Image (cartoon, rainbow, N blue to C red):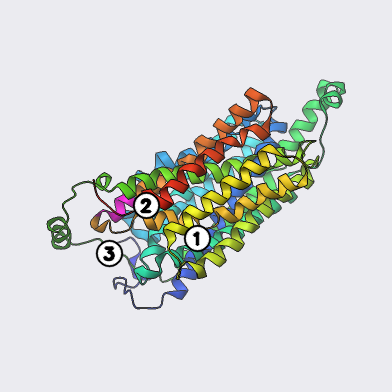
């Protein structure tokens, strides 16, 4: 694929037998940074709820704005990659993230929630471009038989960033100052306003630091030698068309169900992470304060990281379809237990869902693009677009929580998502065309 600045890249196509360890290491840094940024959102939800005086539904619009970018920007991201190539596409993505991080400064100074949401949308747009480039890139960077293993490895690095995101976000953003309803009403309007202004301004330092880190990663990418994935020639496309009776990517049922599975998986994972703090604060669960509760987001992600490193090894030997279905069933059991019991054990069951989540995204992704031939690129774009589930499921969960005044009951929403994912693993992922 021709690209701007191609003198900084090799011109050869991907060789399935070549060792691309250095290229994978560079790409892994992208998986790390976008996970770190994404999972700071779990800290922003309760934080902006205080700073901007929001309901559970309103605060969940953090995820709606961020993950909504995946739906809106996935196809434009594919067009950008075709025009400028993977390397410059990644640099454009990092640049968008840089702009999004800087938008948090005026948002914090004005304490206008809509500006925060704009910044989150721009950040999400940059990450969308990185995802559209990096996920199929890693899958194609070597032997197809080990694609799931490679994606699980990079997703393990992703989980490391996901684990550190809530920890660093909590450390740098959360003040630890909380008021009960009675204490809040006892404060004067001036005291309430001063508290909210202070809470809003606490995001300036971490997001300014993030902007600096994004610039450094962009410089590293610019001077790196990433191998090129070239477009198919017209002759190669015609060859595929002659040997493929399907004329649309949507004629592959395993791709259709895979898109829905990615939608539900990301939605469930994000929804659980978004409301773990609220769950841990419940008097009948652990009765923790905000600073103590935020640690359980990191634990949730740490279990996902452990599972991904384990999955990177196991999926070279196990049937990925059975593995996916089994993990979804385990998530259903753990959530059902957490919803219907109380105490610390319910909280531990909730964070163990992170282990079940660990290999779902890369496994669904590789199952969904299997044997798509010349439809692989368009199939990948639709799968990335389906990450918009992270924008839809958390607000639904927030609505259920507000409706019943019970965050515990709202966890039935992600439980329902895992029921379908289990179906996809055992049945829907079988390769057949319709």
Quarter-wise, where is residue 240 in the image? bottom left
- Under tag 3, what secondary structure? loop
Residue 197 % position (x, y): 74, 33
Q: Which mark is residue 218?
A: 1
Q: Position of residue 15 (x, y in %)?
A: 31, 74
Image quarter (top left, top right, bottom left or bottom right) of the N terminus: bottom left
Q: CA distance from mark 2 to mark 3?
A: 28 Å
Q: Which one is closest to the eye, mark 1 or mark 2? A: 2
Q: Is residue 282 left or right of residue 378?
A: right
Residue shown at the point (36%, 78%) measured from the top left = 18
In the displayed structure image, the side of residue 18 where residue 247 appears, left or right: left
Looking at the magenta stretch, what is its main secondary structure? helix
- Which mark's residue is nearer the viewer, 2 or 3? 2
Q: Is residue 122 magenta?
A: no
- Picture quarter containing residue 222? bottom left
Q: Quadrant of the C terminus?
A: top left
Task: Please say if 79 is above or below 239.
Answer: above
> Front-most of 179 and 240?
240
Say which residue appears at 59% left-offset and 27% top-offset: 399
Marks 1 and 3 sit apart, C-alpha to C-alpha, by 22 Å
Q: Where is residue 194 shown, x and y percent of the image? A: 79, 30
In reply to whether residue 376 is colored magenta, the answer given is yes
The residue tagged 2 is 429
Could you tell me which residue is drawn at 75 percent across and 40 percent down? 342
Residue that badge 3 annotates: 230
The span picked out in magenta is 375-380
């Amino acid at each position: 694929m021709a690209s701007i600045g191609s003198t900084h890249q090799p011109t050869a196509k991907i060789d399935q037998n070549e060792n691309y360890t250095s290229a994978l290491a560079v790409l892994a840094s992208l998986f790390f940074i976008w996970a770190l940024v994404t999972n700071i959102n779990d800290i922003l939800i309760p934080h902006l709820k205080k700073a901007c005086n929001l309901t559970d539904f309103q605060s969940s619009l953090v995820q709606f704005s961020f993950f909504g970018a995946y739906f809106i920007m996935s196809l434009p991201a594919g067009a950008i990659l075709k025009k400028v190539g993977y390397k410059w596409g990644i640099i454009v993505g990092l640049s968008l993230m840089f702009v999004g991080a800087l938008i948090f400064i005026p948002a914090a100074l004005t304490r206008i929630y809509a500006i925060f949401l704009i910044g989150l949308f721009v950040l999400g747009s940059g990450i969308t471009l990185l995802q559209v480039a990096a996920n199929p890139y890693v899958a194609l960077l070597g032997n197809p038989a080990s694609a799931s293993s490679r994606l699980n490895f990079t997703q393990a690095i992703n989980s490391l960033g996901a684990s550190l995101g809530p920890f660093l976000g909590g450390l740098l953003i959360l003040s630890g100052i909380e008021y009960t309803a009675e204490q809040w009403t006892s404060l004067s309007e001036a005291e309430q306003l001063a508290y909210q202004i202070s809470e809003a301004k606490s995001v300036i330092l971490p997001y300014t630091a993030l902007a600096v880190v994004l610039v450094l990663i962009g410089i590293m990418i610019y001077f790196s030698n990433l191998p090129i994935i070239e477009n198919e020639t017209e002759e190669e496309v015609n060859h595929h068309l002659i040997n493929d009776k399907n004329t649309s990517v949507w004629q592959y049922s395993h791709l259709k169900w895979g898109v829905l599975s990615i939608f539900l998986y990301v939605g469930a994972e994000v929804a659980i992470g978004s409301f773990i703090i609220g769950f841990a604060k419940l008097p009948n669960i652990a009765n923790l304060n905000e600073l103590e509760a935020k640690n359980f987001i990191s634990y949730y992600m740490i279990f996902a990281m452990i599972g991904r490193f384990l999955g990177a090894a196991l999926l070279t030997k196990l049937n990925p379809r059975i593995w996916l279905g089994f993990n979804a069933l385990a998530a259903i059991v753990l959530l059902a237990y957490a919803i219907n019991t109380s105490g610390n054990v319910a909280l531990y069951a909730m964070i163990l869902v992170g282990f079940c989540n660990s290999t779902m995204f890369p496994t669904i992704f590789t199952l969904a693009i299997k044997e798509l031939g010349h439809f692989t690129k368009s199939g990948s774009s639709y799968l990335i677009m389906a990450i918009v589930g992270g924008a839809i499921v958390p607000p639904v969960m927030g609505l259920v929580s507000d409706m019943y005044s019970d965050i515990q009951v709202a966890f039935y929403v992600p439980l329902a998502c895992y029921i379908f994912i289990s179906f996809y693993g055992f049945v829907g992922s079988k390769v057949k065309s319709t």
